[in-house]
Image: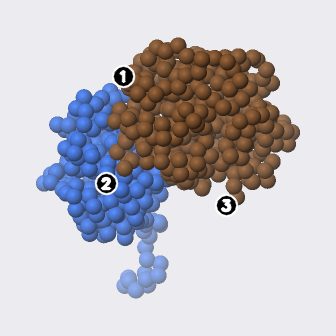
Chain colours: A brown, B blue
Amino acid sequence: MQSIGDILKDEKLDEHSTWLETLESVSADDVQRELSQSPGRFRLNRLLTLVSPAAETFLEEMAQQAQALTTQRFGRTIQLYAPLYVSNYCVNRCRYCGFNSTHDFDRRRLTVDEAVADAGIIASEGFRHILLVSGEDRTGVPPEYFCALATRLRGRFSSIWIEIYPLTCEEYARLFAAGIDGVALYQETYDRSVYADWHQAGPKSAYDHRLDSPDRFAQAGMRRIGLGVLLGLADWRAETLALSRHAAYLMKKYWKAQVSFSFPRIRPAYEVCDQFDHLVGDTELVQMMLALRLCFADAGIVLSTRESAALRDRLTGLCVTSMSAGSKTNPGGYTGKHTTEQFTIDDSRTPALVAAMIRSAGREAVWKDWDTAFSA
Amino acid sequence: MEDTLTIADRSFTSRLFIGTGKYASNRIMAESIRASGSEMVTVALRRVDIENENDDMICAIDRDRCVLLPNTSGARDAAEAVRLARLARAAGGIHWIKLEVTPDPYYLLPDGTETLKAAQQLVADGFVVLPYINADPILAKKLQDIGTATVMPLASPIGSNQGLKTRAAIEIIIEQAVVPVVVDAGLGSPSHAAEAMEMGADAVLVNTAIATAQDPVAMARAFKLAVEAGRMAFNAGQATRQKTASASSPLTGFLRKE
């Protein structure tokens, strides 16, 4: 099987400009024809039709199909998780990020004990699924740090994800053995030239190394693969084409792992000014989520507290399967430390309030949907 | 004589087993189980704290009425399923297990090889094992040979509501099985359940079709009635079916004396 890098190159999916005309050429008839097909299976042309400008007028119909499909496959449930930021040190200089190494602020990384203390607060709020997050701080929080932390957290959490810098396959295997079962790693943008422009220095400037990361952690045995693009860097329609191609590739090749999609939209952050040409509005965000659901019946769809309470309430019953709540995006934030956050969250409701909202939307808030007993 | 179903050392008057995922709340789940009349309720070990007596989901199940049947949903191989079952027994004291080994997280189709391997270990360990399988008659035989309490072939992919797509193979399993055959997964409407019971299935298991119905409690009752009707029809001995109306005998009529 070809590598994902070669596939994207061959199909020119890493060159967004080549797709814009095709996207524009989709007609209302094309959309209607696509919506008359049984939903849930991926074909690139189907995805393309559903993210096209022409599909915008069919959002209600797409939403109804997506809602029915999500309810059928996932039931009337939303799973809850919380992120735990362990370090805001970073060697990269991503121009959109508050943790950019050129930004001058008091950096902070948590010791394993401090991280366990923050996790204790998260557990006391009811969470059993936790996401460990850090900047690219390999010297400060090396893979061994996450192994040690996961070992300490396994008793209290039934599922542990990480969202950190890319690792080698062997390192991922060690983390998996320590009890980490999912990895979220977003390509940020699939367009090579846009990627190069936003990631000019640091290890993250290596596009292909990042692109191949899900292969490495899937090979290491991880059960859950979190994919996404940072919305605002490049044309979202073309991004979704590449993202979906990547997901379909991983699902075929690593058929035991489950793929989920996240939809991070660029948020205000420390020393990051507004200089984004491709910001994504609510309508576009919803269209992207619906299009992915209608092509991937069983993919997780994750919505973080980057989004407003009002929007999250609306999207709860639509196609979302997993949500964070009560998030702090600064290291030590749960135990009241005042450190710099990666971005400003929007939905600042407590986990209990978010759970109550989910129930009032006719869904069950699920805190536990995994068990550490699965791992040796 | 009462028409009861016996699995291991337990008798059941209801032949409808219920799954507990996908409900909008534990309250609706509890009401649906009650309306279904079910006496066998399966719970994913991944969803509950089995050692916690106050676990919301477990507390919502009336264990005086129903056997709580933990399942290994999410297990990718035999080792994981066995480990999960053992921990559940150690923590919750339950030695019944619905064995699910489903390495593909999308269609959740069962892995026959790993299921057989896990069943061997669990039966040897003293578990009452109810394995979820593809509608594979040979695998069903192998499982009953090693001592599983039932076999649970799928009607169609789980959660798909497509009904009895595997009908021909399930007919063979029913014909040949010496343990109860529980048709599991894919039954989307009461008529599908009735069809399985008419064919001679000993029981059916339903989750998605009830949990995601507009009115789960009413749908649970509809399934109850359908399962009862299907079973009654099976016991009644159905009239022969044929494609044409029976007319006189065009080929052999001449033999009849006027």
Return the x and y of residue A218 as percentages of the image width and height: 55, 50
Q: Secondary structure at mark 1?
A: helix
Residue B128 falls in image quadrant: bottom left
Position of residue A225 in the picture relative to residue A36 (left or right) = left
Mark 2 residue crowding within 10 angstroms, few (<14) / some (14–19) / many (20+): many
Q: Which residue is mark 1?
A: A124
Q: Residue at x 72, y 19 (%)?
A: A272
Q: Quadrant of residue A32?
A: top right
What residue is disc 3 on? Answer: A1
Q: Give the alpha-carbon distance from disc 2 to disc 1, as whole Å.
A: 30 Å
Disc 1: host chain: A
Vertical order, B52 against A45 (above or below): above
Residue at disc 3, secondary structure: loop
- Can residue A187 be seen from the camera position used here? yes
Q: Are marks 2 and 1 on the same chain?
A: no
Look at mark 2 in the image and give the residue it sits on: B82
Q: Amino acid at mark 1?
A: Ser
